[in-house]
Image: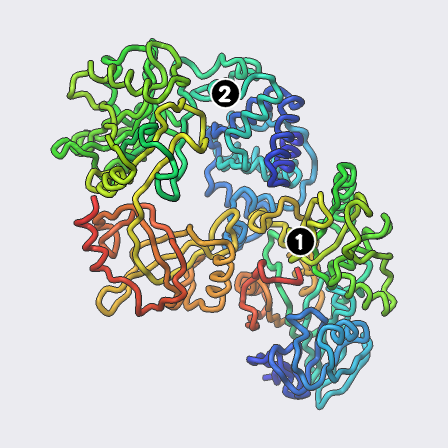
Amino acid sequence: MNRFATLFAALDGTTKTGAKTAALADYFRAAPEPDRVWTVALLTGRRPKRAVNSTELRLWAAEAAGIPDWLFEESYTVVGDLAETIALLLPPPSTHADLTLDDAIRGLIRLTGQPVEARKAAVLQAWTQLPATERFLYNKLLTGGFRMGVAQGLLTRALAQATGVEEATLAHRLMGDWDPASITFPALIAGDAGGDARPYPFALASQLESGAEALGDPDDWRAEWKWDGIRGQLVIRPGAFALWSRGEELITDRFPDLAPLADFLPPGTVIDGEILAWDTTRSAPHPFAQLQKRIGRKTVPKSLLTEAPAKILAYDLLEHLGRDIRDQPFAARRARLATILSDLPPTLPLAASPLIAFKTWEALAQTRATARTEGAEGVMLKRAASPYFQGRKRGDWWKWKLDPFTVDAVMLYAQAGHGRRANLYTDFTFGVRDGNEIVPFTKAYSGLTDAEFNEITRWVQKNTLERFGPVRKVPAELVFEIGFEGIQASPRHKSGIALRFPRMIRWRRDKGVADIDTLDSLRALLTAAP
Amino acid sequence: MVAQVLTFTDRGIYCPAGDFHIDPWRPVPRALVTHGHSDHARWGMSAYLATHQALPVIRKRLGQITAESIAYGEIRQIGSATVSFHPAGHVPGSAQIRVTVAGETWVVSGDYKTEPDGLAEAFEPVPCHAFISECTFGLPIFRWEPQPRVIARIRAWWAANAAQGKTSILGAYSFGKAQRLLAGLGDHGPILTHGAVEEMTQTLRDQGYPLPPTIRVTPEITAKTHPGALAIAPPSALGSAWSARLGPAEEAFVSGWMAVRGIRRRRGLGTGFVLSDHADWPGLNDAIRATGAHRVFVTHGYTAPFRHWLETQGYEAGIVETQFGDEAEPETEVTA
């Protein structure tokens, strides 16, 4: 843990990418090999199963620190991170143990499923042995959420520096379903892991902020709808059928209705596309809310399968007849995709996402304006000659989204954020007018600058009317323009509506509570928006 | 029912028996001031009383004022109140103020720190019936490492930066924290100072506080003329044109708030050193216990949970609201 803690301190102690890469590369050269594997696993979101739940952790930590539970919760509110709160609250260690990262994680894996006394004894013992940073990291292993400010690209660059293997090759080798508990570092780097169902690193588009004119000749570009579903990769190889989410999560079992595709697509096919809940009567996607019902479930009830059957609209073909074709031009990959899909029976839940024909940027802008009626968020622009690149690389792929809906609303409640925003009031509940009342209708917590959050935090502290735990009621005075992508009727909310992607567009210092919008104006959008 | 020795008004803490305020924030005829930080020594009072050691800084900051000074421990009668000032260990010259009326003694802590830092007059517990305690860091997550350990960490950071040909810039409040750092680090060659820090340092040096030699940063001073140097500047100078002149440089902020990772990262800082001029959780609890007080009023900081905690420990506890909000505000907090 000591080495890992040193690495963490180095990564955490700088905001400079170069310094982070160097620290990681050093670590990948010198740390014990099993520790290197775990570090790659943690930085790519592969965590050991949780041996202890957070309720248990809170109780044990409060007991070990000799403080009442309420004081633990107050402390947690300020720190904003459970692992850190515990590390700060515990008395200094009494002894010192020299655990490797591998020791610590395997110890935790052995703990899963053990009786509570055994798990508690092991955790308490670790706490008395580990110094501050190691204790924090040990707690991070326990709580699961591991974010060290290391992007995937940075990790592969550091690994490439340390091993001499090319970055793009490494990025692919790190994908998929490998098990850090059983693989060796050389095997991981050599690409022996990941299995037959390994996906490719996703290519990601950048937001087009101004108009499309700057992109040059429209003939060099292809346009398609930007669907509001789950981006996924469908992998069909001999003996393997897998559906991966963009977060590299294996979601095959959540979509049993897609399973028949395995029988129709030739082995050695990898498709990038959007998973959507499909409205068969309208032949159009359902709003995201329908798909959302299926995301959280490990098994899908029959009723949902009929109500919101899944369908993939395919964007791209990455592997054809077992060959990686990512370096071919987009237009060529698309043509091959069309050939494959044209052979399929039309009842299968897979189709090409249609290309939008356009001669001029102006014509495309007009088509884009109709995105909402199509059930899309806007359009995607892809350079016809572009390869399927890795990660977010500006220039070849752009998402050109519709302007969001907006509404002016007043802040009613404020709550402090977590992590980097601990101690800052950043999570707000907003209300709109409904007759003589102001009804809460959404929460939002992003879109303002740090300076604005600081200013609002001071205002909240001085203007609190009531406290409900971490939440503060404030006078209905501060008005914000709230942007959102979609709106749904929702019987679960007091306002009767639910917004998609609500965020603060700007603080309207020029407006007062008399200027806010009404619930009726929001209801009117229900019919306008999908 | 014993008379209230002190009451809490919208101008600050007030003593009816002596007709004076302590650390008031609006103009009053007579102000007793615990120390020279700007949230305690405010402009506009008709008369000020502070310790001999605190007054030069207060004068420097407030300009033309009518003021008197007093020695630590010296007893003074004001109306029917008896007052005396006692070391608070927060910054040089800082005091707790003891007020006795008709045999009932209350103490206002001002800001305080229980660990001696080698520069400020060391904190002394003052027995009293009621204690008005700050609680800037009144949560059990705040537990300071001993100063020598933190200083050693800063030295190691400085040495590592110097080895890479970089200047080390420490952000620290210009009165108190900056001089504490100078006293702890100054034996390693002259330290560069920002003008605001230098001014306070010179004021304290003139009073006889043992501070090492420093070099004020002027346009002629750069990383070339002083390679591998350590510079101390107010936090606002971090990331500014001022610090760019000394580049290539590494910057770090020195404050108790750096104990919380989220707060450090929000300030966009890679490196933070946890060193505070306020008492930590054990310090607050020890200090309160040492007064023998039965009643405790808390102010400045995590007042609500800290009061609740004190009640569970058997104290009769209350909150003194201040103009500065009732919650710690790391972004605006200047004396941490």
Relative side of A383 to A115, left or right: left
Give x and y (percent) for residue A318.
36, 18
Q: Nearer the viewer, residue A221 or B334?
A: A221
Task: Identify which residue is drawn at 39% across, 24% down.
Answer: A386
**Residue A426 visible, this angle:** yes
Reading the image, the residue beneath label 2 is A168
Badge 1 element: helix
Give x and y (percent) for residue A227.
28, 35
Q: Amino acid at mark 1?
A: Ala
Of badges 1 and 2, the one in the foreground is 1
Q: Residues within 10 Å of mark 2 (few under 14, many from 20)?
A: some
Q: Is residue B68 above or below residue B187?
A: below
Q: Toward which corner of the image does residue A323 lie, by quadrant?
A: top left
Which chain hosts label 2? A
Give x and y (percent) for residue B64.
74, 81
**Residue A239 visible, this angle:** no
Which chain hosts label 1? B
Task: Identify which residue is drawn at 21% across, 52% down.
Answer: A525
Badge 2 element: helix
Task: Identify which residue is drawn at 83% across, 56% down.
Answer: B215
Q: Amino acid at mark 2?
A: Ala
Q: Is residue A102 above or below residue A133?
A: above
Q: Quadrant of the N terminus of chain B?
A: bottom right
Give x and y (percent) for residue A431.
31, 61
Q: Toward which corner of the image does residue B116 lie, by quadrant?
A: bottom right
Reading the image, the residue beneath label 1 is B241
